[in-house]
Structure formats: C-alpha cells, structure tokens
Amino acid sequence: MSDLLNKTGERAINNSASKSAAEKRVSSTFAGLQHRNYKLWFIGQIISLFGSWMQMTAQSFFIFELTHSPAFLGFVGFANGLPSWLFMMYGGVIADRFSRKKILIITQSIMMVLAFILALLTFTKLVLPWHIILLAFLLGIANAFDAPARQAFVNELVPKEDLLNAIALNSMMFHSAAAIGPAVAGVTYAVAGPAWCFIINGLSFLAVIYNLYIMKIASSGGKASGKSAVHELMDGIRYVRTQRKIQIIMGIVAFSTFFGLSVATLFPDWAVKTLHGDSTTNGLLQASRGVGAVICSLAIASYSKKMPRQKVLLTGLFSLPLFMILFSFNSTLLLSAVILVGIGAGIIAVNNLSNGLIQTLVSEEFRGRVMGIYSFSFFGFMPVGALWIGMLAEHFGSPNAILINAGILLIFSLIIFYFSNRTAKIKN
C-alpha cells in the first residue's frame, strides 16, 4: 500500500511538473499578449487582416476573371506597390515625427473607404480593370505611410524583453489571417461574388480603428527636429549606410521578396490553368501558404529568446527556392498545398527574423526611418517582383516563371551562405 501511495504521489508530482512546463511554454509563446495595448492591437489587427486577405484573394481572382491575363495580375501588384518607391521612406520620417497611433488611425480609415468604393463599383457592375488598378495604387499610398508606423509602433506596445515575441506574434496573426481569409474568400466568391469579400474587408477595419482609439499610450512617435523631411530622410539613409548588419538583412529581404514572395502573384493563374480549378482553389493555395507561415511564426514566438536567429534565417532563405522548384514541377492540388506550407514557412523565417534582428539593432532615434527603409525593401520590391513574374508567366507559362525565379534565388542563397562567415555576421 505504501509503495502504491508513493508511486501515485510521484505520478502526481510528475504530472504537475509537466503541466507547469506546458503552462510556461504557452506563457512564453504568447508573452506579448500579457500587455493590454498589445492585446488590443493583436485583436484589432487579426480581424482587419482577415478582411484584407479576403479582399486580396478575391481581387486577384476577379481581375484574372475579367482579363484572363496573368500579366494583369502583375499590373495590379505593381500598382499596389509603386507608392512604396515614391512615399514609403518619407512614411518613415512621418513615423518619427508624429504620433504613430494617429497615423495608423488615419491610414486604416482610408483603407476602409477604398474597400467600400471597390465593393460599390462591383455591386453596381460598373467596375473595370483600370478601376481595380487605380484603387490598388491608392491603397498602396495609404500603406506607404501605414507600414513604417505599424512596424515602429510595436516597440511602444511591449517592453523591450518581449519585443521579439511581439514581432513573432505579429507574423503569426498576419499569416493566421492568411491561412483562413483566402479559404473563406474562395467560398464567399463562389457563393455570393467578389463584392461581398470587399464589403467584409471594409467592415473589418472598424475593429482595429476602435482598438487603436481606446489604447492608452503615454507617447507615440517622436518630435519634429526642425529639419526638413528630406534632411531627416537623408540622416536615416546615412545611418543605415553605417550599419553593415542592417544593410545585409535588408538585402536578403529585398531579394527574397522579389524572387520568392512574388510566386503568390500567379496563384489565380495556377489554380485555373494548372489545377483546372476556380476561386475556391485559389483560396486554398493562399491558405496553404498561410498555414506554413503560422507554424513557423509559432515556433519563432516559442523559442524567440533561445533561437539561433542567423542560422534559422539562412535556412529559410535556402529552403525557399528548393520548395519553389518542387512547386513548379507539380500539377495536383494536394501536392501544391503541401509544398506551399513549406514556402510559407520559408518566407516567414526570412521576414520575421529579419524584422526582429533590425528592431534590436536600430537606435531608437532612427527607428521610424529605418523601419521605413526596411518596409521599402519588402513592399518596394514586391510590386516589381509581381510585374516581373507576371510578364515571365505571360510569355513562358507560370511553371517556367516560378522555376526561373527559384533558380536565381537559389544562386543568391548559395552566395549568402558562402560569404556569411567571411563578411560581417548578423549576431544572434
């Protein structure tokens, strides 16, 4: 009897210890959500991003349905990203000068109005391809000022020790929406039409706008220095030129965005011509990429304080073109979905860890401007990559276009691997 009681007690202690370890792991994974402002941000953003992914998925398939041209998929992506080249670095200056909270309320409100305009044009059957391209351009202008403020704003929502965790959670919520939103958009599009996807997106902005409004933040953004915007921008660029590690990270982000992330531009064409599917198929492709990104984001959030970030970043950079090569040779929905999980994980490993590394390296004085330049390395190269791969697909077909991009990105990855130990290293 005594032995039985002892064994029972030992099992109880072991179970309690296991439960305690599991609770600590969960607490560590979601550390950022312990802070009220970040929790409000997380909830509002994930609702808004769900709507945004619905619109992006429906819009890409809608323009393809109107034109039957993969080149137009590239035109929309280019129009959406062109403002990044024109305004995003100035957006970083604005993020250092003014309240980031107020900037985000304004930009999110503009995005909401644009979504409702597209919905109205679609409901009334007045929409033409050039309308979609113009609205994508206007949305890109709003994003050019939204992205730097959004990237720098996270630093104001959590203490420094939880910053990397919050950045990982940001990626998780973005790609959770990317996993669910496109799938729901595909079904909604098939059942009710694209206009309802745009309406849902417009309504979803109310969540993040309201949550931003009720946040209590002592200070948000910097103060005007008395210098011109151009002068402050040049100060930011000169600062980046002195930071070799930040330059390398931004180069990796730009290259992987141009040749890697741009593969998503061709999903509508792939869904119809390769998989012989429809809007639902397109949504499933987008969702599969999102699932891989969520899995990777959760892993980074869980091990953000222990992860060898340089190694994981370079592994993601190298795995991305390998998965793209596999994707270019397959022609079944199941295999496409499985491979896209790997592509999504590779993309998030590069972008998430790059963001976190830069946020820990940058001086607070230049945070907004550096995040503006970082955002440009992502959003600025996305439209050019979309235009590039869209034109390749128009002339050589989507499989060959993806294969060409994968080959170039693989060569770049091998160069980075080779020189990573001979040039300035990115410290963990």
Image (tube, grey):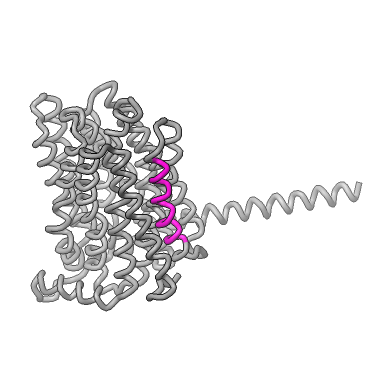
Residue projecting furthest to the top: 191
**Residue 49, percent from left and from top:** 30, 43
**Residue 40 in view (yes/no):** no
- Residue at 28% x, 39% y is 266
**Residue 393, percent from left and from top:** 24, 40
How many marks do you count on the picture? 0
In the picture, measured across the screen, residue 382 lies left or right of residue 32, that is left
Q: Main secondary structure of the magenta part?
A: helix
- Residue at 34% x, 38% y is 286
**Residue 347, percent from left and from top:** 37, 51
- Residue at 42% x, 30% y is 332
* Quadrant position of residue 46: top left
User: Residue 319 magenta-drawn?
Assistant: yes
Nearest to the observer: residue 336 or residue 141: 336
User: Residue 90 magenta-drawn?
Assistant: no
**Residue 88 in view (yes/no):** yes
Residue projecting furthest to the right: 1
Examine the rendered structure and indicate whether residue 248 appears above or below residue 125: below
In the picture, measured across the screen, residue 49 lies left or right of residue 115, that is right
Nearest to the observer: residue 235 or residue 396: 396
Nearest to the observer: residue 354 or residue 148: 354
Examine the rendered structure and indicate whether residue 397 appears above or below residue 125: below
Quadrant that contains the C terminus = bottom left
In the picture, measured across the screen, residue 176 lies left or right of residue 222, that is right
Nearest to the observer: residue 275 or residue 427: 275
In the picture, measured across the screen, residue 312 lies left or right of residue 149, that is right
Residue projecting furthest to the bottom: 242
* Quadrant position of residue 152: bottom left
Which region of the structure is painted magenta?
312-327
- Residue at 42% x, 60% y is 313
